Image: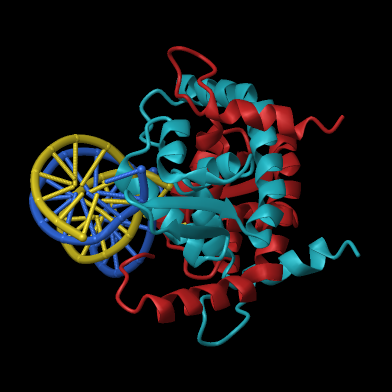
Chain colours: A red, B cyan, C blue, D yellow
Amino acid sequence: MSQGHMEVTALLEPCGKEEHPDCGIRDVLTRVGDKWSVLVIVELASGTRRFRELQRAIDGISQRMLTLTVRRLERDGLVARTVFPTVPAQVTYELTDLGSSLTHLVKQLADWSLAHREDIANSRTDYDVANPDHTIH
Amino acid sequence: MSQGHMEVTALLEPCGKEEHPDCGIRDVLTRVGDKWSVLVIVELASGTRRFRELQRAIDGISQRMLTLTVRRLERDGLVARTVFPTVPAQVTYELTDLGSSLTHLVKQLADWSLAHREDIANSRTDYDVANPDHTIH
DNA sequence: CGGAATCCAGATGGATACTG
DNA sequence: CAGTATCCATCTGGATTCCG
């Protein structure tokens, strides 16, 4: 059942003539890698949230970016959006089954990040000391 | 040993007064989420590669972006760069232990992407049909 | 071969103001 | 409350040229 190796090999091969050669994986990774998506996913992993609840939970996100982020997640089928036509309007967001299945992997990535962030920070410091005038970031 | 839940909760809390409130996880995720890093990591997961080998293996990457990508991965301690002072120069790249430990997660993400790319594509199509004039991407 | 340097277009994201 | 609209700064990444 552990077929990970075979699958991933296909990553670097064109899998369809007309499509992008990355088999669409980049679509998913750029979504996960954008500035706010993961934080939204992690927050929704704890339960249904309203728009303002999300904004208060995610420090620093602007109204505009929260809107864009949840819209993209909704378009990808990872998040479900429900509008209650009350006054004022009330909108809730929750993960779909697809979104929940991704959450598990996102949490592993988050844990890895937390576990190794010291290593990475140290490596960066070392690199910056050894290469005083680099422009990489 | 499964402490995933507790760890990730910390994601949304400021963990240090002076630092970014995301505990540095965004550093890792943006690295994984950028356009080329994952493809470089996956290729290096198969073994040591020279610069030109990487470029030939990764379809569409420019010289500049390959340089930037491997430099960032090196700075983060995920990739080791070795220069052989021959003429012409010969440079090899390989994953460090840290990089290898991330590879496993990256492969899971890649497998998830491949497994669900149809679902996502369908969801996007449905969304675009239901919202004919949206500007999201 | 393995880059570095420069230039430039497009994407991303923040601030602000306005709305049903 | 839950957005939309606009403007604008920054970042990302591609193309090209040059270099040891």
Judging depth in this view, the residue of A136 and A57 nearest the camera is: A136
- Give the quarter of the figure containing the C terminus of chain A: bottom left
Q: In this view, does A5 lie above or below A125?
A: above
Query: Where is residue A20 drawn, in percent x and y?
Result: 45, 24
State whether residue A36 appears in this view: no
For this orientation, the residue located farthest to the top is A17
Quadrant in which residue B35 is drawn: top left
Query: Where is residue B53 drawn, in percent x and y?
Result: 45, 37
Judging depth in this view, the residue of B119 and A94 nearest the camera is: B119
State whether residue A11 appears in this view: yes
- Give the quarter of the figure containing the N terminus of chain A: top right
Q: Residue at x 56, y 56 (%)?
A: B29
Q: Residue at x 32, y 40 (%)?
A: B62
Q: Which residue is drawn at 57% across and 52% down?
A: B94
Judging depth in this view, the residue of B40 and A95 nearest the camera is: B40
On the rendered structure, is A22 left or right of A50? left
Q: In this view, does A2 lie above or below B64?
A: above
On the rendered structure, is D7 left or right of A94? left
Query: Where is residue D5 drawn, in percent x and y?
Result: 26, 45
Query: Where is residue B16 drawn, in percent x and y?
Result: 59, 84
Q: Is residue A18 above or below residue A70?
A: above
For this orientation, the residue located farthest to the front is B87
Judging depth in this view, the residue of C9 and A6 nearest the camera is: A6
Q: Which residue is drawn at 45% across and 18% down?
A: A19
Total numbered labels placed on residues in the image:
0
Quadrant in which residue B101 is drawn: bottom right
For this orientation, the residue located farthest to the bottom is B17
On the rendered structure, is B120 left or right of B34? right
